[in-house]
Image (cartoon, rainbow, N blue to C red):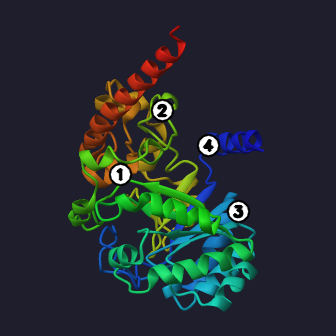
């Protein structure tokens, strides 16, 4: 199955054809998470009728994976109608949500409208931590009650954590909670500035000493450094087979790559993605790893968590190095080299007569 999917994705990539799209339906949210990248100035949102037109265009493009995020998607009163309209087009539907606006009856409703997977934020192993980061009292207990209901309906669930200074020591508790609830768990360490340039979310990012306490798989996305060669993503599939759409209809190369290449209120998706692509989109598709000169031959590239979209957020230029990724690579390389040296020493000792 994996081989077949790889062949399909290769074909999509050769045609710069969209396979997966993430839609921000709103920037409004009942929470005020301390690390959120979305500022408090929600833009005008696409209407239900505009979404119906968009879904038809996405189907024509051949999109398979369609995700909805926010803000909190279900703060929109018409979110259920949006999901119904998307479901009719046959997409694999994923929703990224806090889950806080769902009542018990809504869980079965998710299944009925065709949602196959849900990703929910878990920001602490204890109620006081999770609730204080989200700034929403009762959020943790609501999550614990909601997850089993989702699993019972056969909806895939992933609990996702952004590791911060305020919660990283509770990582074992969060992993254990996911095991108890029998759902997948994922964590990441990247924290970005807000879209309006406010750097305050970075105040909560892990420092060098704290990173040393985090399992390598959550830093570099691999169980060990031995499989992390050329870890830094100098180019990626954003703008090729991945794309995103903002609440006001701007088309982006990906969710975190906040450089509009068109707007679906002014052009069709086909015109934006294929017929008359923005010159920036063309450059993005033609860019090679070696075009990122500062990073291409870097000695710490195997240890670098560089993401092109995050580089654009940080610097405005995808070909530049990321100061944040450079700092992390320095720390990770030290951790990794020490770990690999220790492993070799253990192996040599075990072979000794």
Is 353 displayed left or right of 325 in the figure?
right
- Extreme front residue here? 353
Residue occupying the point 43% across, 36% down: 287
Q: Which residue is mark 2?
A: 228
Tell me the crowding category of disc 4: few under 14, some 14 to 19, or many 20 or more residues within 10 angstroms, Cα based.
some
Per the rendering, the mark at residue 13 is 4
Residue occupying the point 65% across, 88% down: 106
Q: Nearer the viewer, mark 2 or mark 1?
A: 2
Q: Nearer the viewer, mark 4 or mark 2?
A: 2
- Extreme top residue here? 353
Instruction: Of the two numbered discs 1 and 4 on the same chain, state the one appearing first in sequence.
Output: 4
Separation (CA) of disc 1 from disc 3: 30 Å
Q: Quadrant of residue 128?
A: bottom left
Q: Which residue is mark 3?
A: 60
Separation (CA) of disc 2 from disc 3: 37 Å
Q: Nearer the viewer, residue 269 or 6?
A: 6
Callout 1: helix, strand or loop?
helix
């Amino acid at each position: 199955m994996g081989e077949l999917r790889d062949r399909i994705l290769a074909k999509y990539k050769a045609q710069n054809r969209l396979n997966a799209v993430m839609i921000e339906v709103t920037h409004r949210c009942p929470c005020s998470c301390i690390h959120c990248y979305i500022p408090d100035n929600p833009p005008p949102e696409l209407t239900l009728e505009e979404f119906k037109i968009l879904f038809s265009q996405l189907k024509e493009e051949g999109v398979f994976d369609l995700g909805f995020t926010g803000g909190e998607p279900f703060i929109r009163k018409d979110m259920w109608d949006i999901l119904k309209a998307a479901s009719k087009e046959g997409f694999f539907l994923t929703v990224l949500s806090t889950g806080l606006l769902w009542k018990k009856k809504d869980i079965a409703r998710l299944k009925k409208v065709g949602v196959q997977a849900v990703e929910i934020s878990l920001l602490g192993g204890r109620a006081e931590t999770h609730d204080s980061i989200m700034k929403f009292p009762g959020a943790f207990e609501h999550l614990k009650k909601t997850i089993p209901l989702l699993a019972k309906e056969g909806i895939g669930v992933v609990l996702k954590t952004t590791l911060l200074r305020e919660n990283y020591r509770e990582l074992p508790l969060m992993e254990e909670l996911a095991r108890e609830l029998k759902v997948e768990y994922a964590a990441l360490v990247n924290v970005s500035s807000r879209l309006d340039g406010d750097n305050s979310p970075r105040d909560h990012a892990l420092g060098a000493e704290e990173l040393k306490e985090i399992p390598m798989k959550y830093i570099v996305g691999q169980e060990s450094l031995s499989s992390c060669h050329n870890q830094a993503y100098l180019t990626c599939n954003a703008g090729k087979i991945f794309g995103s759409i903002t609440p006001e209809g701007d088309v982006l190369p990906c969710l975190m790559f906040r450089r509009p290449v068109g707007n679906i209120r002014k052009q069709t998706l086909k015109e934006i993605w294929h017929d008359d692509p923005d010159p920036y989109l063309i450059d993005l598709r033609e860019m090679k790893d070696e075009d990122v000169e500062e990073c291409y031959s870097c000695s710490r590239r195997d240890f670098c968590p560089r993401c092109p979209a995050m580089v654009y957020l940080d610097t405005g230029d995808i070909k530049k190095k990321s100061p944040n990724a450079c700092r992390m690579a320095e720390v990770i390389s030290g951790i990794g080299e020490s770990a690999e040296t220790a492993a070799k020493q253990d192996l040599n000792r075990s072979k000794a007569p």
